[in-house]
Image (cartoon, rainbow, N blue to C red):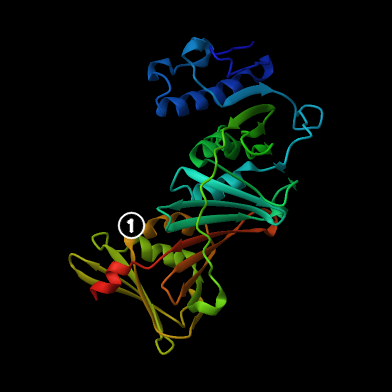
């Protein structure tokens, strides 16, 4: 059975043996688009009686039934400049969700791997690094490929099958193609014989800040348990406008301070504690940061095993989160935030 909307942007082919599986996928799509206001919630019902296709505005998805990915059932074009294939799309979804604090994201693809950047106000920045070995296939035909797309939409596509894969012990397989400047990113997701084809428009990317965080100007560095730092962050006084990080060569503690309505609140983490793997400091460090700008770092903390904290002589702070994935591979997320000059001048 084929269903088209009035712009022929949505196609469903139903095989009787997979009909219920497709109903579940389509229900997921319909709910997603209803939340975004694409069409009335009253049209969200059982798919045994599908709504009129003129009311369905699913512009990015095409769902059909096929066997597992193979060279016979996936179209091959010679003009792809980027081709990615992985057996578990949940890995990349997991990583990208951790940096999704703003919609726009810049993808940079080189032979060394995939880097995805999200930033706010040309100051706070999150970078996710995914090495080629995590993918089953990673082909980049140019020295560097860059494009910008809506990260929220991409995550909706990657999670179109919902949590069904987790419940059944399977994960959707992913194929991603990009043909170059001005073309959409094409995504094929396959699970249990159902393939969903998503096309996401790319836009001209705005240059992102390139933080030069050389080792020569780093004055403080800590490697510690991410779980410990997450607990501290979650308990910070929300009435404080800023958070201060302090350490010195002579101090036995790493100190985190907030300045709230009820007073000054210190958290001291002993250098000799089990949660700190190493602490190196060449000179006294004490910088303040807007607490609101530090909040995007909490989500990566929740999935990381370790975190490296570095501060340079200008007060720029960098958290590097190490995240373990399948087959003993690691992914990394970097968070950058400059010190707040106004708070420093008020002292």
Above/below status of 216 relative to 176: below
Whether residue 255 appears in this view of the structure is no
The foreground one among 14 and 340 is: 340
When asked about the image quadrant of residue 123, the answer is bottom left
Above/below status of 235 relative to 51: below
Above/below status of 247 relative to 97: below
- Quadrant (top left, top right, bottom left, bottom right) of the C terminus: bottom left
Above/below status of 232 relative to 158: below
Give the number of marks.
1
The foreground one among 179 and 317 is: 179
> Residue 102's spot in the image, x, y percent?
44, 46
Looking at the image, residue 321 sits to the left or right of residue 168; the answer is: left
- Quadrant (top left, top right, bottom left, bottom right) of the N terminus: top right
Q: Residue at horizontal 42%, vertical 55%? A: 296
When asked about the image quadrant of residue 284, the answer is bottom left
The foreground one among 291 and 121 is: 121
Q: Residue at horizontal 60%, vertical 47%? A: 92
Q: Secondary structure at mark 1?
A: helix
Q: Residue at horizontal 64%, vertical 37%? A: 172
Name the residue at the right extreme: 72
> Residue 257's spot in the image, x, y percent?
31, 72
Category of crowding for the residue at label 1, using alpha-carbon neighbours closer than 10 angstroms: few (below 14), some (14–19), many (at least 20):
few
The foreground one among 72 and 111 is: 111
Q: Which residue is mark 1?
A: 292
Q: Residue at horizontal 39%, vertical 63%? A: 231
> Residue 70's spot in the image, x, y percent?
79, 32
């Amino acid at each position: 059975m084929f269903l088209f909307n009035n712009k022929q942007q949505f196609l469903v082919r139903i095989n009787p043996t997979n009909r219920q599986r497709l109903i579940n996928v389509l229900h997921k799509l319909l709910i997603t688009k209803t939340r975004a206001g694409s069409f009335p919630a009253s049209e969200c019902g059982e798919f045994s009686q599908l709504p009129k296709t003129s009311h369905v505005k699913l512009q990015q998805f095409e769902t059909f039934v096929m066997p597992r990915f193979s060279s016979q059932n996936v179209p091959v074009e010679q003009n792809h400049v980027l081709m990615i294939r992985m057996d578990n799309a949940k890995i990349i979804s997991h990583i990208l969700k951790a940096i999704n604090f703003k919609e726009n994201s810049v993808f940079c693809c080189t032979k060394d791997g995939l880097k995805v950047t999200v930033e706010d106000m040309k100051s706070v920045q999150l970078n996710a690094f995914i090495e080629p070995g995590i993918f089953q296939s990673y082909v980049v035909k140019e020295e560097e490929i860059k494009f910008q797309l809506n990260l929220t939409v991409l995550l909706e596509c990657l999670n179109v099958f919902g949590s069904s894969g987790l419940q059944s012990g399977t994960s959707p397989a992913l194929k991603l193609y990009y043909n170059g400047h001005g073309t959409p990113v094409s995504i094929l997701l396959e699970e249990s014989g159902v393939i969903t084809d998503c096309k996401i428009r790319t836009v001209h990317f705005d240059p992102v800040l390139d933080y030069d965080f050389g080792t020569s100007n780093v004055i403080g560095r800590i490697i510690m348990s991410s779980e410990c730092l997450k607990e501290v962050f979650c308990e910070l006084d929300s009435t404080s406008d800023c958070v201060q990080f302090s350490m010195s060569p002579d101090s036995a503690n790493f100190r985190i301070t907030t300045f709230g309505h009820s007073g000054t609140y210190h958290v001291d983490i002993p250098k000799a504690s089990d949660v700190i793997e190493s602490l190196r400091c060449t000179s006294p460090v004490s910088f303040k940061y807007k607490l609101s700008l530090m909040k995007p770092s909490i989500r990566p903390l929740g999935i990381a095993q370790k975190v490296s904290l570095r501060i340079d002589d200008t007060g720029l702070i960098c958290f590097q989160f190490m995240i373990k994935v399948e087959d003993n591979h690691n992914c990394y997320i970097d968070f950058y935030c400059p010190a707040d000059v106004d708070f420093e001048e008020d002292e």
